[in-house]
Image (cartoon, helix red, strand yellow):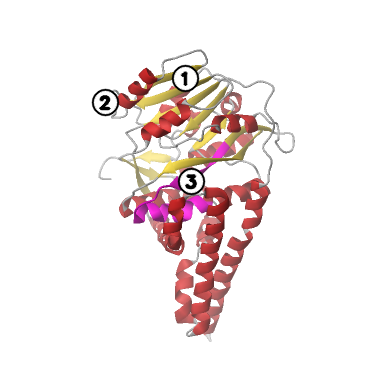
Amino acid sequence: MWAVKVASLALGIVALSSLGLALSVLPVRRFLRRREPADPPRWPRVSVLKPVKGLDPAAEEGFESFINQDYPGELEVVFAVEGEDDPVLPLIRTLQAAHPDRPGREVRLVHSSARPDVMGKANNVMAAQAAATGEVYVSADSDVIAGPDDVKRLVRQLLSNEGRGGRRIGAVGAIPVYRGMRDLGAGLIGAYYSPFMVIFYSLKDWLGPRDVFPGTYYAVLPEALAAAGGWGRIADNIADDSTMGRYLFEAGFESVMSHVTASVPEPTKRVREYWGHQHRWHLTYRTTLPFALYLLSPLAHPAGLALALPFLLPGGPGLAALGLYCLTRWVVIAWLNLVVLREPAMWRWLWLMPVSELVLTGAWARALVDTRTTWRGIPYRVAQGGKLVRLEPGA
């Protein structure tokens, strides 16, 4: 009798997860049908803040994509690097020489001072902001490649005054999309996280509150950032983007998503690095979500239960349920790739979606017992609320 109950429970969880994923196409379609706003009366001066560390494979293409933006107003690109020995510096100086300052277009370089109490990215962003002269900030991770009119589209929505409940839009984000995956580790990331981001942000836009703040690529009003406490307030937080979204909402601003995608080249990634990536993500969830919600989160991706169904329900029913589980995921991801992601490499790694979900369950379990992580070679413990506590090496 107990075996029948276990099998029924597993089948019910798998069926509900698959149904929820199938229904997720509805908020995505709603999000995609949203019209882009009209041009503002005046295009403000924009400061593109580029925190940089190390030399990414597509660094030159990514940097050039921001320098050559089709933006009607004035624009400056401010690269922020920690230290004088970073290998990316020769490239930035070459780009400065190739793009000499002209009225309304500047390429600048600033250095941040090493601070053990602040995460490196936040430290560089704050250094770039201190030198920025724009009326709007656009921040993008060092590996993001921008579309030719991304900044224009982000600013257009930022100034559209299309907030809800009398709130003003304070920040506009772009959906991260991993591109060019060529090996297993990169394929595991692309097969899950790009589709997940589209679904998650579309749901948030529909259900609210509109407090999303993807740290990969976004535009923000300086006054909204100041009201929320600035980047210094989240500089020691592993969940910096979601935390800033909450602070902006508490300050009376909304953070919304645009149709712009943040193209993040991810050609290769070692499986060990992928596992560490998953652990950091789950520590973020573990320390910022209500504990009960975190405990229940694997029910959204029950790959382990789906794989057990052929044994719990011997014969055709178990195999059919597993097949339907996988098919639902493959069809939804294929549709998302056709209408949103448009990434050719995704077709090669489509089959990995259930495998990625199985890895997520392992990362979920690890985060329950191991709160340590490493970021840019520095060991930390992640405390409640996502706060990073720096550890001595070997601790």
Q: Is residue 187 magenta?
A: yes
Q: Judging from the image, what secondary structure is the residue with disc 2 in?
A: loop
Q: Tags 2 and 3 in contact by the CB under 8 Å rule?
A: no
Q: Nearer the viewer, residue 164 or 190?
A: 190
| Other-residue count near label 2 (Cα within 10 Å), few / some / many at <14 / 14–19 / ≥20 | few
Q: Judging from the image, what secondary structure is the residue with disc 3 in?
A: strand
**Sooner in the amino-acid sequence: mark 1 or mark 2:** 2
Q: Which residue is mark 2?
A: 85
Residue 173 picture location, percent across and down = 56, 38
Quarter occupied by the C terminus: top left
**Sooner in the amino-acid sequence: mark 2 or mark 3:** 2
Residue 213 picture location, percent across and down = 55, 39
How far is disc 1 from disc 2 in space, using C-alphas?
22 Å
How far is disc 3 from disc 1 in space, using C-alphas?
29 Å
In the image, residue 17 sits, relative to residue 374, either above or below, namely: below
Residue 365 picture location, percent across and down = 42, 60
Q: Nearer the viewer, residue 386 or 204?
A: 204
How many dots with numbers? Answer: 3
Chain part drawn in magenta? 173-196
On residue 130, the disc is 1
Write down the quadrant of residue 169 in the picture.
top right
Q: Which residue is mark 3?
A: 177
Answer yes or no: is residue 299 visible. no
How far is disc 2 from disc 3 in space, using C-alphas?
30 Å
On residue 265, the disc is none
Residue 175 picture location, percent across and down = 54, 43
| Other-residue count near label 3 (Cα within 10 Å), few / some / many at <14 / 14–19 / ≥20 | many
| Other-residue count near label 1 (Cα within 10 Å), few / some / many at <14 / 14–19 / ≥20 | few
Answer yes or no: is residue 227 visible. yes
